[in-house]
């Protein structure tokens, strides 16, 4: 069976790796164009491109599928199925119509919940206890196609978005291999239409989500810190200086002090009062212009402020 794979970031790279070395190894890979990254703004290839090149798979990086030449190039590859994981581009209907078995997408949520670009992060930000991966047939909408299969997993109350993403990537890769394998054996995969009345959205993240509002509950703040790690990272003003907050724990302790009051420094972190009267302990932080470090280590050399903002 001729498979064309489309994807860009690390979750897609994991799924592509699962296909490589099997009878389902793609005949071609499509990924987004190389982009400038990091402080040096050097051009860097996507994680998917790195995997494809390592396995000598031809790589295509079109800017748009509206271009007839790009469309004809894809059509000439004669894919039986197109597998898509976090590609980052909308596929027009004429592309969806090319493969005889359709386009199969792996999405990192339990659809129709969390359609969109940031399902892993929003699962944590929304305080969800469970998430998963969905195998679905693509249509012209955003994550609106018929569901083939869903696999679920509980969200660990201490894992951050990257850790959850890593787990879901493996689950997604395993599901993709299984679904494509069943197709290759001639099995007709099931189709269950989504109930759009139950749909929720997971929009792209932005730095507007970063500042911590200490009037929120300790649990909400804890979820914010986990959900925004590794990007864009929760932030707080401590002593007039902006900090990125990478890790925190809910202490379960009560306090009558005002939200944002810093009660003191423990062996593991700085204890701060939240809006519900519970406290949270900031354990890993990074001062602006500084290095990421344990909170006690930082505040041994700097005065501990009285209030977080």
Image (cartoon, rainbow, N blue to C red):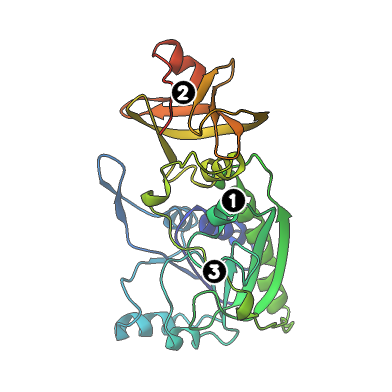
Which residue does the image show at 50% across and 56% down from the upper left?
55
Measure the C-alpha gap from mark 1 to mark 3: 14 Å
| As drawn, 170 above or below 75 | above
| In the foreground, 195 or 132 | 195
| In the foreground, 138 or 100 | 138
Which residue does the image show at 42% across and 50% down from the upper left?
209
**Image location (x, y in percent) of residue 186:** 72, 83
Question: In the image as oriented, which residue stretches furthest toward the top?
Answer: 301
Q: How crowded is the residue under tag 3: few (<14 C-alpha within 10 Å), some, or many (20+)?
A: many
| In the foreground, 114 or 39 | 114
Q: Secondary structure at mark 3?
A: loop
| As drawn, 184 above or below 13 | below
Q: How crowded is the residue under tag 1: few (<14 C-alpha within 10 Å), some, or many (20+)?
A: many
Q: Earlier in the sequence, mark 1 or mark 3?
A: 3
Q: Quadrant of residue 107?
A: bottom right
Measure the C-alpha gap from mark 3 to mark 2: 35 Å
Q: Secondary structure at mark 1?
A: helix
Residue under circle 2?
293
| In the foreground, 173 or 307 | 307
Which mark is in front, 2 or 1?
A: 1
Q: Earlier in the sequence, mark 3 or mark 2?
A: 3
Question: Are the residues tagged 2 and 1 within 8 Å (C-beta)?
Answer: no
Task: Please give the label number shown on residue 115.
Answer: 3
Residue under circle 1?
124
Task: Please give the label number shown on residue 259.
Answer: none
Which residue does the image show at 51% across and 17% down from the upper left?
296
């Amino acid at each position: 069976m001729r498979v064309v794979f489309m994807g860009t970031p690390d979750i897609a790279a994991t799924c592509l790796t699962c296909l490589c070395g099997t009878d389902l190894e793609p005949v071609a890979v499509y990924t987004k164009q190389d982009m400038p990254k990091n402080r040096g703004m050097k051009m860097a290839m996507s994680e998917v491109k790195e995997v494809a090149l390592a396995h000598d798979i031809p790589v295509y990086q079109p800017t748009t599928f509206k271009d007839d030449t790009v469309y004809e190039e894809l059509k000439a590859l004669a894919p039986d199925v197109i597998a898509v994981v976090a590609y980052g581009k909308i596929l027009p209907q004429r592309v969806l119509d090319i493969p005889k078995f359709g386009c199969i997408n792996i999405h990192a949520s339990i659809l129709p919940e969390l359609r969109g670009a940031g399902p892993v992060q929003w699962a944590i930000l929304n305080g969800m206890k469970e998430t998963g991966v969905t195998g679905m047939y693509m249509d012209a909408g955003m994550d609106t196609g018929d569901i083939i299969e869903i696999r679920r997993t509980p969200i660990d109350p201490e894992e951050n978005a990257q850790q959850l993403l890593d787990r879901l990537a493996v689950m997604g890769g395993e599901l993709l291999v299984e679904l494509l394998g069943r197709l290759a054996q001639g099995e007709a995969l099931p189709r269950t239409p989504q109930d759009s009345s139950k749909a929720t959205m997971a929009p792209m993240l932005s730095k507007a989500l970063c500042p911590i509002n200490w009037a929120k509950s300790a649990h909400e703040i804890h979820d914010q810190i986990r959900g925004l790690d590794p990007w864009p990272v929760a932030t707080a003003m401590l002593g007039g200086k902006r900090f990125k907050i990478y890790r925190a724990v809910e202490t379960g302790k009560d306090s009558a002090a005002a939200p944002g009051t810093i009660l003191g420094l423990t062996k593991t972190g700085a204890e701060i009062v939240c809006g519900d009267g519970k406290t949270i302990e900031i354990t890993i932080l990074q001062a602006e212009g500084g290095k990421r470090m344990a909170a006690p280590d930082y505040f041994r050399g700097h005065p501990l402020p009285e209030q977080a903002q």
